[in-house]
């Protein structure tokens, strides 16, 4: 294909006004930029929160955050700003994707956008959030906060798998194993708590988390 840019969209998205034009214009004017995030909106027009203000923290960074020495920045949704990575539903420069070998097929559903952004950053490409480009996403918040606990939990399990793969691939074996061990300890305590409360749904969910952390490939 001769196309310079590649647009990734989910089937449950509606492009508003001149969103694509705004993204294309920005990439045309900034050859150092490899990816752009639009502003995602819920069907009612409210902002759909997608925090791209930082990559997942390493174990060292997590300790610093826990000790209160570093505060997480709140993302701005009304400003054109440079971000660590663009969300999966965005506009990407084809050359930039070719530089990193395109999208890693090992990621399923979640984490691929973070991985792409991290690899782009390593290659010197920049990412930006463009608030003038607005897209309605019908499924995003509904999946995360679905009143059906089973659906919401499946979402979180897939997200956990994506973050684990990101750690393993990009932060090295030491960080990955320490991170996984820390999550296993937390999940074990949570499992005991919900078992004592006789909460069958959350007890089962805790067991599924532990299975994921132990690398057991159960279908979700």
Image: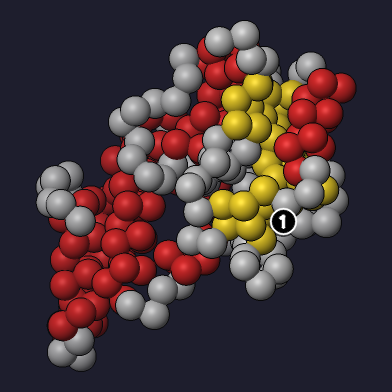
Please say whether residue 38 is visible from this viewpoint: yes
- Residue 97 placed where, x, y %? 56, 18
Give 98 or 122, whichever is nearer the viewer.
98
Residue sitting at 18 percent across and 62 percent down? 208
**Quadrant (top left, top right, bottom left, bottom right) of the N terminus:** top right
Look at the picture and state if 62 lies above or below 25: below
On screen, residue 158 versus residue 83, left or right, reads left
**Quadrant (top left, top right, bottom left, bottom right) of the C terminus:** bottom left
Give 17 or 198, whichever is nearer the viewer.
17
- Residue 179 placed where, x, y %? 35, 47
Residue sitting at 73 percent across and 51 percent down? 16
On screen, residue 48 versus residue 79, left or right, reads left
On screen, residue 205 versus residue 159, left or right, reads left
How many marks can you see?
Answer: 1
- Residue 205 placed where, x, y %? 22, 69
Q: Quick one: label 1, few (<14), some, or many (20+) residues within 10 Å?
A: some
- Residue 195 placed where, x, y %? 15, 83
Residue sitting at 87 percent across and 22 percent down? 29
Residue sitting at 29 percent across and 40 percent down? 177
Residue matched to label 1:
75
Q: Could you say which quadrant of the image residue 112 lies in? A: top left
On screen, residue 111 versus residue 31, left or right, reads left
Please, which residue is most extreme toward the top here? 2
Q: Could you say which quadrant of the image residue 124 lies in? A: top right
Please say whether residue 73 is visible from this viewpoint: no
Q: SS for tag 1?
A: loop
Look at the picture and state if 168 lies above or below 132: above
Give 219 or 60, whichever is nearer the viewer.
219
Please, which residue is most extreme toward the bottom here? 197
Look at the picture and state if 14 lies above or below 30: below
């Amino acid at each position: 294909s001769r196309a310079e840019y590649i647009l990734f969209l989910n089937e449950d998205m509606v492009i508003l006004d001149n969103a694509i034009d705004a993204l294309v214009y920005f990439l045309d004017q900034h050859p150092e930029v490899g990816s752009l995030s639009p502003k995602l909106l819920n069907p009612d027009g409210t902002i759909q929160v997608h925090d791209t203000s930082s990559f997942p923290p390493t174990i060292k960074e997590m300790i610093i955050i826990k000790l209160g020495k570093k505060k997480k920045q709140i993302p701005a949704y009304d400003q054109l700003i440079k971000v660590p990575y663009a969300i999966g539903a965005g506009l990407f420069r084809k050359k930039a994707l070719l530089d990193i070998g395109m999208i890693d097929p090992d990621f399923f559903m979640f984490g691929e956008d973070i991985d792409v952004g991290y690899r782009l950053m390593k290659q010197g490409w920049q990412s930006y959030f463009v608030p003038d480009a607005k897209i309605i996403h019908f499924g995003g918040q509904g999946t995360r906060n679905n009143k059906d606990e089973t659906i919401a939990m499946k979402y979180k399990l897939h997200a956990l798998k994506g973050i684990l793969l990101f750690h393993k691939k990009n932060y090295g074996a030491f960080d990955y194993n320490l991170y996984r061990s820390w999550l296993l300890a937390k999940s074990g305590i949570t499992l005991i708590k919900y078992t004592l409360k006789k909460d069958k749904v959350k007890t089962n969910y805790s067991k599924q988390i532990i299975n994921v952390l132990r690398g057991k490939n159960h279908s979700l």
